Amino acid sequence: MRQSDRGLFEAIGPNELTAYLRAHGWLLQREIGRRGSLWEHKPSSIEAVVPSDSDLSDYPLRVEEALNALVQVEKRSITSVINDVKATLSDVLRFKAPAADAGTLPFDKAVTFIEECRAILLASACSAWDPRPFYGPKKPHLASEYLNAVHMGQTERGSFVLTALSPVTHSYQGSLFEEELGEPFERTAVKRLMSGLAEVGPAIRSALNTGVYDRFQSAVAKGVSANFCDALATMVECAPREQVEISVTWASNLEAPHAEPMRFARASVDILHTAADVLREIEPAPDYELQGFVFKLARGEGAAEGLVTVVGDIDGITRRVQMYLPARQYNVAVRAHENENYIVCTGDLKKSGRHWTMENVRSFRTLR
Amino acid sequence: MSFCVIAHDLGMAPDNWQEAFGDGFIQAVAGAAGCGTAIRRPDDDSIDWTLYSRLPTRPKIDVQVKTWTGDDGKNTYLSYPLKIKNYHDLIIGNVSDPRILVVVTVPKDRGSWLYCTTDEFRLHRAAYWVSLLGQPATSNTKTVTVQIPRANLFTADKLQELMLQADAGTPLS
């Protein structure tokens, strides 16, 4: 065995192997102590020993032997067997740019494509926790933790295909939705992604035909959010000939829901960005932390409180945000403006058309 | 008796040539014992062959094979200079299947490696096995001299005995 292959075999856990064997018609014969478990493929009488202790020094050798038994039965390369074994306990998402030339993308576009795949996964995980039209910079802890568990998989032949392996080995409850209680959070997040995509298609057609974005609003419960729409639109924009296809192969250790591959093209981009704006307007982003400079101050004669305009960064774009401040906070804003100090404020960020406001400002202070 | 006259050089590197003959030794003994064999190349983890059987616990024995022209056949022990990496890979105990070193002693003259007649097929000269389980680590930088009892002939009946020990989970002896 090459040392370079050792890591490949070490990365396959006993649970993945046994789940794969079970899902592909192998039968457990018996436990064989320190060696692990003995399995048999009845039609061919080929046996496989699955090692149980991944801390043993010869674990990679034993895994290789088990995989070779699978190769014998399935008559395909060990690499493709490994890919499928690794995916057994994971939902495998495929983000595909079908028109990519020889499976390549310009480097910068590939980086953007990957970032937006991450963004749409994060948006779906947020929705799995608490469906909302928009998520500010502070995401639910569970959603961020979920992303740490998702792995980018091996590239696949053909078009440019990014695979994301979302493991479903955890069983903690993470959703607020009763029908999903008990389902691994990771599975809920992926279901929310696919249901969101399924809703977005008809919502785009409706908006194209009528100019009304109501269907996007009613799709929030199914996973659609401003973050979701923006990520999908940007993904399409950086794909060659602006076509993207997203599909899922469900892990074999859980019952698989039905989900068709979804395709999006150039015509959907502007609608998606507009839908994102609409969704941002529906509900303020609560507890949004804005950093920036005081640009403008305005209060009535004799008044202690007043209107402050702060110039700050929202999702990577410089915006002006108006907020009404009571006397004490207004005075802080005055001093910050005079001294050209950087400020940070927290409140509910809201967008109406192109106009941004912050309501219920809970704190306003200078940054040192 | 018909000598095997090695009249030509077919281009194989000398080390590989000797190794190929040693592999033949292993396969012959394993085949005679009724054990399956799986070759492992490259042997980055010091295992050249895995020998296996269908005994109840499906035991395997991992084997590091060395061929050697340096044995004069005289002492009660072979003193084989084993590379440090191989030594450290063979002394470890946290493995699911046991490991042994097999040294196949061969004549310097390739023409004396193999004798074939209508009655017999004889490989020269002999193979010896040893388990290094539990031996101490060493600070040597190149080789460790491993003492292999000349009584430890690696034969088909001995391999069967070792495989039964592996099945029972007892140390190989």
Image (spheres, rainbow, N blue to C red):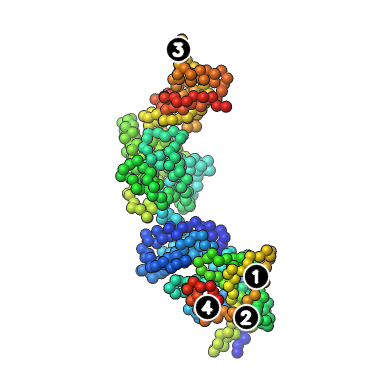
Disc 1 from disc 3: Cα separation: 91 Å
| Residue B95, x across and y down, in percent | 53, 65
Disc 2 from disc 4: Cα separation: 16 Å
Along the line of sight, the residue nearer the viewer: A342 or B164 = B164
Judging from the image, mark 3 belongs to the subunit labelled A
Along the line of sight, the residue nearer the viewer: A355 or A265 = A355
Mark 2, secondary structure of its residue: loop
Instruction: Please give the residue where the numbered disc 2 appears in the rendered image.
Output: B150
Along the line of sight, the residue nearer the viewer: A250 or A341 = A341
Instruction: Please give the residue where the numbered disc 3 appears in the rendered image.
Output: A303
Look at label 2 and name its amino acid.
Arg
Both on one chain, marks 1 and 3?
Answer: no
Comes first in the chain, label 4 or label 1: 1
Q: Is residue A350 above or below residue B125?
A: above
Where residue A269 sits, quadrant-wise, is top left
Both on one chain, marks 2 and 4?
Answer: yes
Look at label 3 and name its amino acid.
Ala
Q: Residue at x 49, y 56 (%)?
A: A11
Both on one chain, marks 4 and 1?
Answer: yes
How many neighbours does mark 4 have within 10 angstroms: few (below 14), some (14-19), or many (20 or more)?
Answer: many
Locate the C terminus of chain A by quadrant. top right
Q: Residue at x 50, y 75 (%)?
A: B165
